[in-house]
Image: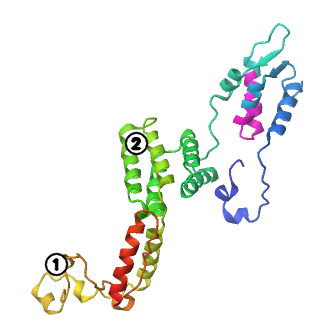
Amino acid sequence: TTENPSFEVIRPLLSRTQVLVLEPLDEQELRVVMDRALRDVERGLGKFPARLNDDACRYLVAASGGDARIVLNALELAVMSTPPGPDEMRVVDLDAVEEALQRRAVHYDKAGEEHFNLISALHKSLRGSDPDAGLYWLARMLAAGEDPLYVVRRLVRFASEDVGLADPQALVQTLGALQAYHFLGSPEGDLALAQAVVYLALAPKSNAVYTAFGEASKLAKVTGAEKVPLHIRNAPTALLQELGYGKDYRYPHDDPSGWVPESYLPERIAGTVFYRPTPRGWEGRFKGLLERRRQSQKG
């Protein structure tokens, strides 16, 4: 199979199968394949004397992605479409190879391994703050026919997961890219995705919100029976007020600072900390304030 068996073959069958991985051919190996095909009279193109000029040869090797099948198919088309010269030699040029390849599709499979490899490469390039790599992987995916809306959804996720409150504008930028793409479509809208990619790469990074919500979700699953504290319960009726709902609630806006030391978690988990802001970007502005407030609550 040309696909990764771990995606295409069910696990029970895969466990009983010996998997042999065939690696792409390198440049020298591909040149050997071409030379043999051009010289072989019985199985190749030896009946039609031909040679490739340097530009055509380099392009065919680069465009093949290491796949000899692509090289042989394109080579045959290019040779047969090139008229022989006075000496019967067909000199295949770059134009003939480009026409034979017909803008060969970039190696990509939307449902298989390469799909996940490329989106992973984009994600990790942005996390590593490399705008050049981010633009390259974005261009690879779009050139291969990936749905731009899938890409922008991943960018929106990245804005929350890997940038977070270190730069709140990251989420605005990615949602703006989504809106721009809906408005413009391809290819004009692709530039909005490129702008978002560069912004995300250059933005300060923080996964503090992502980590905090993960911890809160885990605790919520095992403390789901904990009661809401009486002082922060809703008390729309006289009966509920008599039962203590909303009693002793302190309205933050009544304080000149707009904040009052108060506990809002169930008593058994009071004081639990989920969100730990980093010192990077906008989040650094929250860090000191939050630490002071938490210390005040303890006091």
Give the Cα separation between the discs numbered 2 and 1: 45 Å
Whether the magenta-drawn stretch holds residue 76 is answered as yes
Residue at the image position 38 percent from the left and 68 percent from the top: 285
Q: Position of residue 9 (x, y in %)?
A: 67, 58
Q: How crowded is mark 2: few (under 14 residues within 10 Å), some or many (20 or more)?
A: many
Sequence-wise, the earlier of marks 2 and 1 is: 2
Residue plotted at (64% across, 57% down): 7
> Which image quarter holds the C terminus?
bottom left
Q: Residue at x 44, y 72 (%)?
A: 277
Q: Residue 26 appears in which quarter of the rendering?
A: top right
Query: Could you say whether the residue bearing mark 1 is in a helix, strand or loop?
Result: helix
Name the element at disc 2: helix
Residue 214, above or below 77: below
Q: Give the range drawn in magenta.
A: 60-78
| Amino acid marked by disc 1 | Asp
The residue indicated by pointer 2 is 181
Say left or right for 49 vs 295: right
Q: Is residue 226 above or below residue 99?
A: below
Q: Mark 1 points at which residue?
A: 254
User: In the image, 6: left or right of 160?
Assistant: right
Q: In which quarter of the image is residue 83?
A: top right
